[in-house]
Image (cartoon, rainbow, N blue to C red):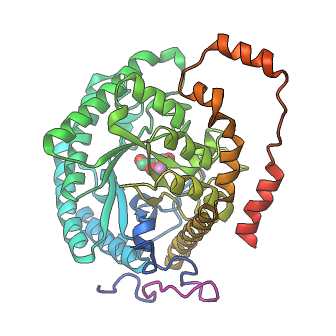
Amino acid sequence: MKSRHFKDIPEIPYEGPGTDNPLAFRHYNPDEVIDGKTLKEHMRFSIAYWHAFRGVGADPFGPGTINRPWEKGRDQITVAKRRMDAAFEFFQKIQAPFYCFHDRDIAPEGATLRESNKNLDAIVKHARAHQKESGVKLLWGTASLFTNPRYMNGAATSPDAHVFAYAAAQVKKALEVTKTLGGENYVFWGGREGYETLLNTDLKREQDHLAAFMHMAVDYAKSIGFTGQFLIEPKPKEPTKHQYDFDVASGIAFLRTYKLDRHFKFNIETNHATLAGHTFNHEIEVAAAVGMLGSIDANAGDTLLGWDTDQFNTDVRELTLAMVSILRAGGLGSGGFNFDAKLRRPSIDLTDLFYAHIGGMDAYALAFKIARRILAEGKLNEFVKSRYSSYDVGFGRDIEKKKIGFKELEKIAFKLGEPAPSSGRQEYLENLLNTYLHG
Ligand code: XUL
Ligand code: CO
């Protein structure tokens, strides 16, 4: 690998928990073999192109603060290629095996759809060469159906069929390039697929249109031989006041209503979970319960703020709980942990990009190791199992096997009298969790 854009920063080494080198991993040892797989293969970390390489630190009160040296130049395609060179250098130095993008992150939008497609083709060619050379792979692709003003009323849920058609053409192309680049998944995050006011909105028609759009995507993917996993990324609000894919539960209802559930799993984002009033862990469990846990957008919100702050997550307790659920569900399959997280506005240095990802990767790797210990020792699982053990035998088992009804249960209730309550032991379990986290 030629070191051009991050000359002062070496490949981030693993130095273990004792190191005082801030540009080293303390817990993420990519080459460590656990159960026949390296930690790199277990974690499947991915870098989000839009934050790491298109984020400039702008907010509603002021412009960007982050100026990257590779952004200088007039010709947009030349700049896009140079930016991608920097991105692949970063992916390798941070030892992330995957990246993710929206079509418009990697290539500039042109004056016409044809021109945009042409730009995309040029950059995809460049990406392909980089992927081949570096071994870095595409975790998922997606289309930006929310940035351009044409999508201000939504894309698939726009009241204007012309906008729907334009969005369809864009997703068609995005599916093609995701396939070309070997993308393992394709994500639908419904940015602007929602409404601001019901005064101007036909909610039923909009949801019908969204479902029709997804069926078209599934059909088209099949026709071109794209075998990646489709993922829905729920979010309750922002940019619209009400987003249709509110949370995992409403996503399941939507997918089942429109007979799409066979084709989709969920990409769960921590900050979206908390915006929906749930914990990260809750969303994972809801998806896992129906076999629809797909991938993770790894970030964190701020408990005091009501918007999507997309911060790097260093909360090992929260991540350990999430990891226990993910491992119990059998892992993420073709998914991974994608750092959909951005630097704070004053974090303007190149080293900040490294510190941020090192912190996130270490926190996830540590949580993974702790969760494995929790599951191996089995105390938590045993407690939960024994809490439900009355359903393993007798009439409890008959309830689960649907062999019994109200009449028989009434007889049992008369016979057994008042049930004896048993403790939920929450405080004991919280203490137990702390022994894994802090010894
Ligand atoms: C927005 C968000 C998106 C998706 C991809 O909140 O999370 O970046 O991850 O469109
Ligand atoms: Co996301």
Q: Is residue 80 visible?
A: yes
302 or 76, which lies in front? 302
Provide residue 255's location: percent of width, then percent of height: 40, 29
The residue under the point 61% across, 67% down is 373
Q: Which residues are magenta?
A: 9-22
Provide residue 319's location: percent of width, then percent of height: 61, 60
202 or 20, which lies in front? 20
The residue under the point 23% across, 58% down is 182
**Is 286 situated above or below 299?**
above
- Say which quarter of the image contains residue 213: top left
Image check: 413 left or right of 418? left
**Is 431 situated above or below 355?**
above
117 or 96, which lies in front? 96
Residue 238 part of the magenta-drawn span: no
Q: Is residue 72 visible?
A: no
Q: Main secondary structure of the magenta part?
A: loop
Residue at far top of view:
407
Image check: 116 left or right of 413? left
The residue under the point 47% across, 83% down is 12
103 or 211, which lies in front? 211
- Say which quarter of the image contains residue 43: bottom left
How many labels, in total? 0
Provide residue 187's location: percent of width, then percent of height: 36, 46
Residue 17 part of the magenta-drawn span: yes
- Say which quarter of the image contains residue 209: top left
Quarter of the picture holding the C terminus: bottom right
Quarter of the picture holding the N terminus: bottom left
Provide residue 90's location: percent of width, then percent of height: 39, 75
